[in-house]
Amino acid sequence: MTSARVVTLGCRLNAAESEVMKTWADEQKMANAIIVNTCAVTNEAERQARQTIRRLRRENPDAYIIVTGCAVQLRPKVFATMPEIDRVLGNDAKADPSNFKPDSGNRVQVGPVAQTVVDQVPLVHPVAGQVKAFIQVQNGCNHFCTFCTIALARGRSRSVPLRLLIPQVQNFLTSGVKEIILTGVDLTSYQDEGLTLGGMIGGLLDALPDLQRVRLSSLDSMEVDDDLFQIITEDPRILPHIHLSLQAGSNTILRAMKRRHDREQAIALCQNLKKHRPEIALGADFITGFPGESEEMFQETIDLVHQCALTHLHVFPFSKRPGTPAARMTNQIAPEVIKDRAARLRVVGQEVLGQFLTEKIGTTINVLAENVARGHSDDFTDVHFSEPVQPLQMVRARVIGVKGTGVVAHPLA
């Protein structure tokens, strides 16, 4: 290894934090370090984290393995007992650059999650050829949905001030990055001296005229205020792909989850987004088999996919997370039913995505080429080029077919 390696599991926020940790490890010349940033969204995510760590140790017997992230924060004893790991860092410890020095501090450093944001945001330097960058603007959550452990793993919501975000984004733009992805645990809860998310994005765009491509990670539909709605639908620099945290289509299940929206609000938002910006692509997260979910309630989720014109689905089978109210509910669904509903909803997702992609045939699209063969269009369609292109550039291309979960497009002169 010539530099530290980071293995990121889970969300885009983890990806943003991984880049910071890699920078710190490289500054300490920890070329033999492997940092594993874990996820805890489901029991399966934790299992995969442990499996990944064991595989990395087998393949890299001399590496210095540091493991951190949400799974570590929630289950420190589990990871502390794994002999494959050299350092175990909680979510606060991974935000301290001094912990990325060889043999610094105790082997296991997992404490309570702080409620404040660090007032120093390190300037992360992109690697050669990096065309997109994840920027963490928010962390933590105040909502405590009954199925979720993120508020326990990440702490309360806090936001990175705009004054600290501007130089970080400028640093990436100067280095040649063309697309910025704003990330957070609960992105729409952003607050900075009276600025909500829409105001902060407007401030970034005003301060950085070279910032032409902004993509947003998952949004809470309940918190899409007028400022955010306006900038999404009216400013072409906000890319036309919005992913919503919807979770279910049944009002009964949404109440049991302690979500703050209902199906009617979700439908209205999606229809308004489409009305004011017809080219926008909409996606959503869903959980199947939540306690008490009947077949009729599950059908409401399927119906919501069509009523909201969703084309990109992330489907999660319900997972009983220790310490959550949902894990203690008595009306649990049989595992085979949970699995079956997840599979059926994924089929629906494949169908709506397939129709969405087919309708693109014959159209001309803008694609950010990530390498000579592939890229993503403005609405996040996965694009395979019919012939090599100049990488790291914007390419105009005509869609000529569908390939898997993406399209084939011919570059135009």
Image (spheres, rainbow, N blue to C red):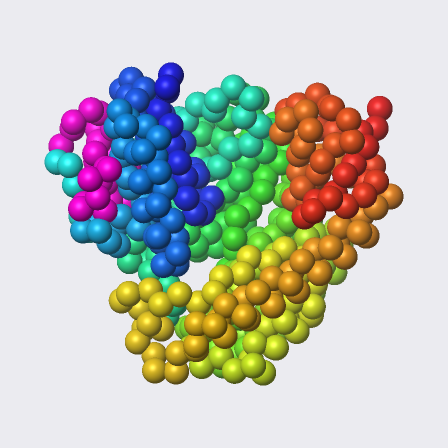
Q: Viewed as shown, does residue 231 lie left or right of 111?
A: right
Tell which residue pokes out farthest to the right in this image. 362
Can residue 124 be seen from the camera position used here?
yes
Q: Which residue appears at 61% of the width and 52% of the height?
A: 242
Q: Which residue appears at 20% of the width and 39% of the height?
A: 83
Which region is colored magenta?
79-105
Residue nearest the viewer, comparing 329 with 254:
329
Q: Which residue appears at 46% of the width and 37% of the height?
A: 135
Residue nearest the viewer, comparing 194 with 152:
152
For the C terminus, which image quadrant? top right
Q: Which residue appears at 40% of the width and 65% of the height?
A: 319
| 288 over 97 or under it: above or below | below
Q: Viewed as shown, does residue 255 lie left or right of 321?
A: right
Q: Viewed as shown, does residue 355 lie left or right of 42?
A: right
- Report if residue 94 lies within the magenta region: yes
* Picture quadrant of residue 362: top right
In percent of width and height, residue 39 lies at 37, 49
- Report if residue 51 lies within the magenta region: no
